C-alpha cells in the first residue's frame, strides 16, 4: 500500500468526534474530507473546525458515503445507530472505526460481522485504553514475564455517568443503552481481556461468566455531578442497574473480576489488578521478580486511565495503529471480530440476571465465515 493517503468521513458530530477529527488530522497518511451528522448544523460546525468547505457537511449518511475519496468512516454516533451505520458503510466498501459499544445486541453484532466479512473491509472498535501508556507498559512487561504466569486480573469502571455527558440521554434507557456494563463497563471488560491475554498484542477469550447486579440509583432522578461536586435534581432516570459485578473465566485458565459502578459518589477511577506467580500490579504500582532488591512497590510514571474526558484518551495512538494496519494490509488486534468477545461478556451478564446461572461463551464465535 506504500505511502498512500486515506480519505476520512467522520459520522456523528458530537463529543467523541472531536478526538477522531484531531487524530486523523494529525496522522500524515489521512485527510478528513467530510463530516456527517443527524443535523446539518452540527456537521457544519465540526467540518468548519477541520477547515472544510460547507459542501463537505452532510445530514444524509448515504450521500456522505458517496463523497469523493472517502476510504475510512469513523462511526461516532450513539450506540443504537452503529449497526445501521456499519452495514451501510461496509456495503459502500469503507474501512471502519467503530465507537464502543459496537452494537446493542448479539443479533446486531452478528449482522455487522457478516457485513464486514462480506465487504472485506478492515475495522477497529474504539477500546481506546489498549493504547493508554500505562496499559501499554504493563502489557509489554507482562508479555516479557515480569509478573510470571498471570492467573488473575481485575478491572473496574467507576464513574457516576449522568447528564454531564452529552451522550447520556441516548444511553440511560434500556432501549438504547441496554445496561451500564454495555454503555461503559465494556471498557473494563476489555481491559480484563487485555491483561488476561497472552503476549503483547492479544486479548483473552472469555469462556464462562457469572454476574450479579444491584446498586441503588436505578429509577432515581437525583444524580451527582463529580466535576462540580454537586447534586442535580430532575435528571433523566437511569433505567438499568448502576452496579454490575461479573466473574469471568478465560479459555487460558485466567480468572477475572470486573465491575461497572455508575452509582458511586466520587470522581472517575479505573483500577487495575494483575496477579502472576512472579509478580503483581496494583494500578501503576508493580511488584516483580525482575526487581529482586525491591522493598517497596515500584511506581510507574506513565499516564493512568483515571479520566473520563475524551481529550485525555489516547485516540491518536489508536488511529495511528489503525492506519498502520491499513498500510500493511493486516487486521487490528481490536477489530470487530475481537471486540465482539468483549461485548459477549456484557450480554452474558444480562442473561445471568434472568437465569441466575453461569453462561458459557462464546455465543457468536462459532458461526462459519460466509
Ligand atoms: N471510546 C471512548 O472512550 C468513548 C468516549 C466517549 C464516547 N464514546 C462513544 O462514542 C459514541 C458517541 O458518543 P458522544 O459522547 O460523542 O455522544 P454525543 O456527544 O451525544 O454525540 C453523538 C452525535 O451523534 C449524532 N447523532 C445522533 N443520532 C444520530 C443519527 N441517527 N444519525 C447521525 N448522527 C446522529 C448527534 O448529532 P447532532 O448533533 O447532529 O444532533 C451527535 O452529534 C457513543 O457510542 C459513545 O459510547 C466513546
Image (cartoon, rainbow, N blue to C red):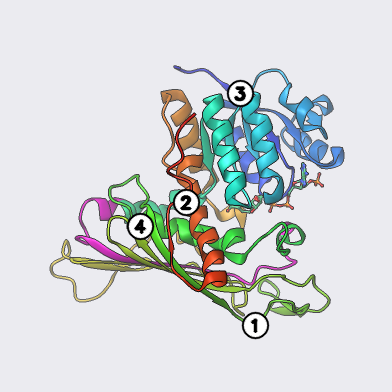
Contact flag, marks 1 and 4 (Cβ < 8 Å): no
Which residue is under mark 3? 93
Q: Is residue 162 magenta?
A: yes
Residue 309 visible in the shown view: yes
Instruction: Name the residue: 54% across, 65% down.
Output: 351
Instruction: Name the residue: 76% across, 32% down.
Output: 61
Nearest the camera: 78 or 281? 78
Provide residue 260's location: percent of width, then percent of height. 54, 69
Tell me if residue 79 comes above or below residue 218 in the rendering.
above
Seen from this angle, which residue lies furthest left?
292
Give the SS element for disc 4: helix
Instruction: Name the residue: 70% across, 63% down.
Output: 174
Contact flag, marks 1 and 2 (Cβ < 8 Å): no
In the image, is 268 to the left or to the right of 256?
right
CA gap, disc 3 to disc 1? 45 Å
Foreground mark, 3 or 2, reads 2
Q: Where are the magenta residues, as a range?
A: 140-167
In the image, is 278 to the left or to the right of 330?
left
Which part of the image, by quadrant, shows the N terminus?
Answer: top left
CA gap, disc 1 to disc 2? 31 Å
CA gap, disc 3 to disc 4? 33 Å
Foreground mark, 1 or 4, reads 1
Which residue is under mark 4? 195
Provide residue 331's location: percent of width, then percent of height. 43, 33
Which residue is under mark 2? 363
Instruction: Name the residue: 43% across, 68% down.
Output: 358
CA gap, disc 3 to disc 2? 27 Å
Q: Is residue 152 magenta?
A: yes
Mark 3 or mark 4: which comes first in sequence?
3
Which residue is under mark 1? 216
Tell me if residue 80 comes above or below residue 44 in the rendering.
below
Amino acid at each position: 500500500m506504500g505511502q498512500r493517503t486515506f480519505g476520512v468521513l467522520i459520522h456523528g458530530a458530537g463529543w467523541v468526534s472531536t478526538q477522531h477529527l484531531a487524530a486523523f488530522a494529525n496522522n500524515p497518511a489521512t485527510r478528513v474530507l467530510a463530516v456527517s451528522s443527524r443535523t446539518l448544523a452540527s456537521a457544519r460546525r465540526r467540518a468548519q473546525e477541520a477547515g472544510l468547505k460547507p459542501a463537505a457537511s452532510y445530514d444524509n449518511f448515504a450521500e456522505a458515503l458517496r463523497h469523493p475519496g472517502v476510504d475510512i468512516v469513523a462511526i461516532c454516533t450513539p450506540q443504537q445507530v452503529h449497526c445501521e451505520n456499519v452495514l451501510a458503510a461496509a456495503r459502500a466498501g469503507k474501512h471502519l472505526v467503530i465507537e464502543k459499544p459496537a452494537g446493542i445486541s448479539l443479533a446486531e453484532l452478528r449482522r455487522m460481522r457478516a457485513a464486514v466479512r462480506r465487504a472485506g473491509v478492515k475495522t477497529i472498535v474504539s477500546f481506546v485504553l489498549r493504547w493508554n501508556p500505562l496499559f501499554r507498559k504493563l502489557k509489554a512487561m507482562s508479555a516479557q514475564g515480569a509478573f510470571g504466569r498471570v492467573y488473575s486480573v481485575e478491572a473496574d469502571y467507576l464513574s457516576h455517568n449522568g447528564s454531564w455527558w452529552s451522550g447520556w440521554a441516548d444511553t440511560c434507557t434500556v432501549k438504547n443503552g441496554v445496561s451500564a456494563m454495555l454503555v461503559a463497563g465494556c471498557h473494563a471488560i476489555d481491559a480484563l481481556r487485555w491483561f488476561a491475554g497472552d503476549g503483547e498484542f492479544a486479548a483473552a477469550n472469555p469462556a464462562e461468566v457469572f454476574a450479579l447486579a444491584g446498586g441503588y440509583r436505578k429509577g432515581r432522578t437525583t444524580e451527582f455531578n463529580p466535576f462540580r461536586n454537586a447534586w442535580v435534581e430532575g435528571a433523566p432516570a437511569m433505567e438499568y442497574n448502576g452496579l454490575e459485578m461479573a466473574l469471568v473465566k478465560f479459555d487460558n485458565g485466567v480468572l477475572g473480576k470486573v465491575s461497572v459502578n455508575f452509582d458511586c459518589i466520587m470522581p472517575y477511577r479505573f483500577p487495575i489488578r494483575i496477579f502472576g506467580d512472579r509478580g503483581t500490579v496494583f494500578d501503576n504500582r508493580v511488584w516483580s521478580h525482575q526487581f529482586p532488591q525491591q522493598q517497596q512497590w515500584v511506581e510507574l510514571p506513565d499516564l493512568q486511565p483515571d479520566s473520563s474526558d475524551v481529550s485525555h484518551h489516547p485516540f491518536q495512538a489508536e488511529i495511528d495503529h489503525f492506519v498502520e494496519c491499513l498500510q500493511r494490509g493486516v487486521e487490528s488486534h481490536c477489530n470487530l471480530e475481537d471486540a465482539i468477545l468483549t461485548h459477549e461478556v456484557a450480554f452474558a451478564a444480562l442473561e445471568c440476571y434472568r437465569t441466575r446461572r453461569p453462561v458459557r461463551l462464546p455465543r457468536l464465535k462459532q458461526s462459519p465465515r460466509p
